Image (cartoon, rainbow, N blue to C red):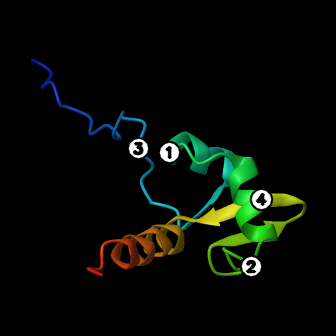
Amino acid sequence: MKHQVTSIPRAATNDEPAVTPEWVLASKYEELTGVTRETVKQRKKAGVWREGAQVAVVHRRIYVNIKAADQWIKDHLTKQHRPA
């Protein structure tokens, strides 16, 4: 009797996470966008990015809300391109 070869389903092998996180560490945000951790800190300090909206500090680690940060950028792009 011959054995039948079966294929075993494998998990995706790419580096993309199965779930896209809403909040990432500032270091990961820098890796994704090029915006440095220091820039994130300065935007928070200056009140440009609000605590709990675009940025959060948890256990002395800085997190960025990707969706809120993207929306902030979109809002500022539309302001810059308005005709005078």
Count of residue discs: 4
**What residue does disc 4 label?**
41
* Placement of the C terminus among the 4 image quadrants: bottom left
> Which residue is depicted at the point 44% across and 60% down?
19
Between disc 4 and disc 2, the foreground one is 4
Marks 4 and 2, the one that precedes in the sequence: 4
Mark 2: amino acid:
Glu
Mark 3: amino acid:
Glu
Tell me if mark 4 has few (under 14), some (14-19) or many (20+) residues whose alpha carbon lies within 10 angstroms of its own.
some
**What residue does disc 1 label?**
32
Tell me if mark 2 has few (under 14), some (14-19) or many (20+) residues whose alpha carbon lies within 10 angstroms of its own.
some
**What residue does disc 2 label?**
51
Determine the image quadrant of residue 51.
bottom right
> Which residue is depicted at the point 66% across and 45% down?
36
Compared to residue 2, the image places residue 66 above or below, namely below
> Which residue is depicted at the point 43% across and 36% down?
15
Determine contact: label 4, label 2, CB under 8 Å. no
Determine contact: label 1, label 4, CB under 8 Å. no
Marks 2 and 1, the one that precedes in the sequence: 1
